[in-house]
Image (spheres, rainbow, N blue to C red):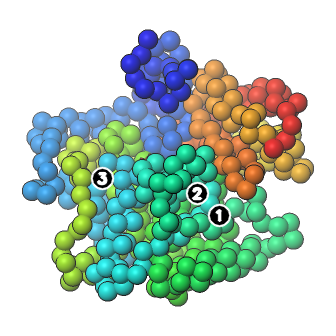
Amino acid sequence: MTLLLHRDLRRPPARALSASGVRIRTSAGREVIDASGGAAVSCLGHAHPAVIEAIRRQAETLAYAHSGFFTTEPAERLAEALVGDVPGGLTRALFVSGGSEAMEAAVKLARQYFLEVGEPQRRRFVARRQSYHGNTLGALALSGNLPRREPYAPLLGTAFSHVSPAFAYRYRAATESDADYVERLRAELVAEFERLGGDTVAAFVAETVGGATSGAVTAPPGYFRMVREVCDRYGALLILDEVMCGLGRTGTRHAWMAEGVAPDLQIVAKGLGGGYQPIGALLVGAGIVDAIEAGSGTLMHGHTYMAHPIACAAALAVQRVIVEQELVGEVQRLGRRLEARLHQRLGQHAHVGDIRGRGLLMAVELVADRETEAPFAPQAGVAASIKAAALDRGLACYPGNGTIDGISGDHVLLAPPFVSSAADIDLIVERLADAIDAVCARAKGQPCG
Ligand code: PMP
């Protein structure tokens, strides 16, 4: 009997009792490898002593002070750690409680910026289908995740529109080169700006590496440079959502560093606090800060728990460990091992269509037919079944189903902690492959979607 309102009302999940390193123990006595860090959250694994100590010390010193009255040392230091060396021109940080709140703040700040600079007509946002930017109504309005959007569609407003994702496995024609594909996406983006009226668009929004909806989808080379050019041509801002893929997860400090562009606004969350505290951040470019400072001088946004001192202290400790132990390099090394093992074990699997990702954000896409790339029928629930079968084998991995244009792309996302051992990585692949074998053998007879 539980009084908690679980997502799955019929089958509440197992109760997690304790965790350390990359393993979580349940009340049923089971030990589970946390192979997706929740949803790419637990970058340092569990029970890291430096983070625990930072939380304890901050709780004793100053647990809470409203950010409208006071600033605090952990918040100041965390801002320095994130934007102190001005990566790509981002110069200020605003701390909130998670990814959705960070996206709400990004949209509102973009809107405020254009009000301050005398372009009040810029109130439209262009995002991509098959994307996820959060579950609050504003962030969901940006998201191109059909199952999550549909029940609320009338509430989501008309300021948000969507163009195609950059997803070569599903949408690049067999005859098309990467460069041709990027040009086709450019034409579509330009056409959307023109349709809306180029001077009405406030921002284009994208995940630098697609996460929860599409599953570790990296853009073809040149895609983000194209996006940056289109935004600059029309005077719109570029907002990059690195809630899942940022802060080392994909092998560079920010995922956009691998793309050769920088955003005007960026959001981060999951790996910021590593799960030790709920925290997200909006990183803001100098031009936007300067315009607001010269204009109203006031940020038109706020929350009670903004820049919460304990959350900031925890995140500061997490980010310091990542730097001191050079864990971003470790992500690259472990990421190469994970990718190689996935290819060895699943590369020829009859129901694996694609193995993709970057660093320690990898996904395996399941298909009914490897040759035609036909997906399983959505009602087969293949990704959800793999999640369950993996849990039975002591592995927690994150399932996804990116329904779009009638295509149901089942995938499983892996995002192991940066502190995983090589043996952990091998075990993750073995258990996942066993779960995939078992589920695909059962799902084989199902019709394709
Ligand atoms: N953006 C992206 C890319 C995400 O992956 C998520 C969470 N899965 C969010 C935003 C929303 O973050 P939160 O769940 O912390 O509100």
Residue at the disc numbered 2: 144
Q: Amino acid at mark 2?
A: Gly
First in residue order: circle 2 vs circle 1 = 2
Q: Residue at x 37, y 49 (%)?
A: 98
Foreground of the two, 76 or 263: 263
Few, some or many residues within 10 Å of mark 1 (<14, 14–19, 20+): many
Q: Foreground mark, 2 or 1?
A: 2
Identify the element where label 1 is drawn. loop
Task: Report helix, strand or loop for mark 2.
Answer: loop
Question: What percent of the width, then of the height, locates residue 136?
Answer: 42, 50
Res. 109 image quadrant: bottom left
- Picture quadrant where residue 393 is located: top right
* Lower position in the chain sequence, tag 3 or tag 1: 3
- Nearest to the eye among marks 2 and 3: give it: 2
Residue identified by numbered label 3 = 96
User: Which residue is denoted by mark 1 in the rendering?
Assistant: 165
Q: Quadrant of the C terminus?
A: top right
Indicate whether 253 appears above or below 7.
below
Tell whether label 1 touches label 2 (CB within 8 Å).
Answer: yes
Counting from the top left corner in percent of width and height, residue 344 is at: 77, 42
Kindly report the distance in space between the C-alpha atoms of the residues bearing marks 3 and 1.
Answer: 28 Å
Quadrant for the N terminus, please.
top left
As drawn, 27 above or below 24: above
Q: Is residue 240 visible?
A: yes
Q: Nearer the viewer, residue 212 or 57?
A: 212
Residue at 40% x, 33% y: name it. Answer: 46
Q: From mark 2 to mark 1, how far is it between C-alphas?
A: 9 Å
Q: Amino acid at mark 1?
A: Pro
**Quadrant of residue 168 within the rendered picture:** bottom right
Give the number of the disc on residue 255: none
